[in-house]
Amino acid sequence: MVFESQHPLVKHKLTLLRDKNTNPKKFRELVREITLLLTYEATADLGVTQVSVETPMGTAVGHELADTIGLIPVLRAGLGMVNGIWEMMPGAEVWHIGLYRDERTLKPVSYYNKLPTAPTVQVCLVLDPMLATGGSAVATIDILKNWGATRIKFVGLLAAPEGIATLQEAHPDVPIHIAKIDERLNDVGFIVPGLGDAGDRQFGTG
Ligand code: PRP
């Protein structure tokens, strides 16, 4: 399942994010804000248990989250997607996975993984702004499934149709929540029209 956001705020903020004149500070703010909006949509099916709560006026029926959530940012660019969600869900656990894409082969290279031996969370949100060839997302989800994770969702900002197809073929059970599916990949594996390099634009390293 692919969920491309139709929310007007997402469309507005994504346009600012794409703009080549947007500076790193503003870029980071936008990544945080768009991620929050996408996560609102991506978490709509989380489980809750019914609890009662005492108000100043009496007893009300309330709910608390039943699922434990893991946020899995793919380094580096996924890091900027963590903090906004974490403010909203402070009990979430954050597990980092480090991958970079070899510029020549476009294949993901793993350089960091400190997951514990058994999964500690029930729902994993994989966070990576860019779904280009899809190689990084597939590799990350392979790692999570080998870890024992069963409910995994991918949250990203921009995707190429090629990346969507690759991820869906490898992991058809993983819903993809994305702000926008762009036209295509260019011959060096960048999403077009895209927004450039999401890691460099956040960290000022471009
Ligand atoms: C970018 C991006 C994704 C990956 C997407 O990372 O953040 O992780 O490429 O490409 P794919 O779908 O073709 O695998 P990059 O290698 O630039 O590393 P960085 O985040 O550390 O800058």
Image (cartoon, rainbow, N blue to C red):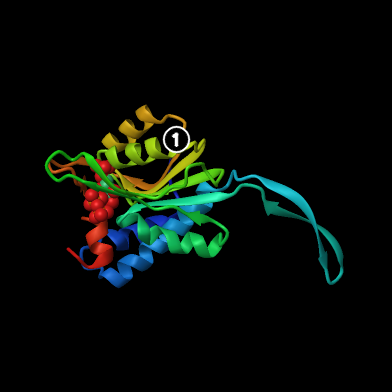
Mark 1: is the Cβ under 8 angstroms from ligand 1? no
Left or right relative to 80: residue 205: left
Say which quarter of the image contains residue 195: bottom left
Q: Residue at x 35, y 47 (%)?
A: 180
For label 1, the residue is: 145
Q: Residue at x 68, y 48 (%)?
A: 48
Q: Looking at the figure, which quarter contains the N terminus?
A: top left
Q: Looking at the figure, which quarter contains the C terminus?
A: bottom left
What x and y, as percent, mark residue 81? 40, 58
Q: Where 133 falls versus 83 (above or below)?
A: above
Left or right relative to 43: residue 164: left
Left or right relative to 197: residue 174: right
- Picture mark count: 1
What x and y, as percent, mark residue 11? 38, 55
What x and y, as percent, mark residue 49? 72, 48
Q: Evaluate whether residue 144 shows in this view.
A: yes
User: Hey, what amino acid is under mark 1?
Assistant: Lys
Q: Nearer the viewer, residue 11 or 205?
A: 205
| Few, some or many residues within 10 Å of mark 1 (<14, 14–19, 20+) | some
Q: Where 84 falls versus 187 (above or below)?
A: below
Left or right relative to 131: residue 84: right
Q: Evaluate whether residue 9 shows in this view.
A: no
Q: Residue at x 82, y 59 (%)?
A: 60
Q: Residue at x 41, y 56 (%)?
A: 10
Q: Which residue is most to the right?
A: 58
Mark 1 falls on what kind of element? helix
What x and y, as percent, mark residue 198? 26, 57
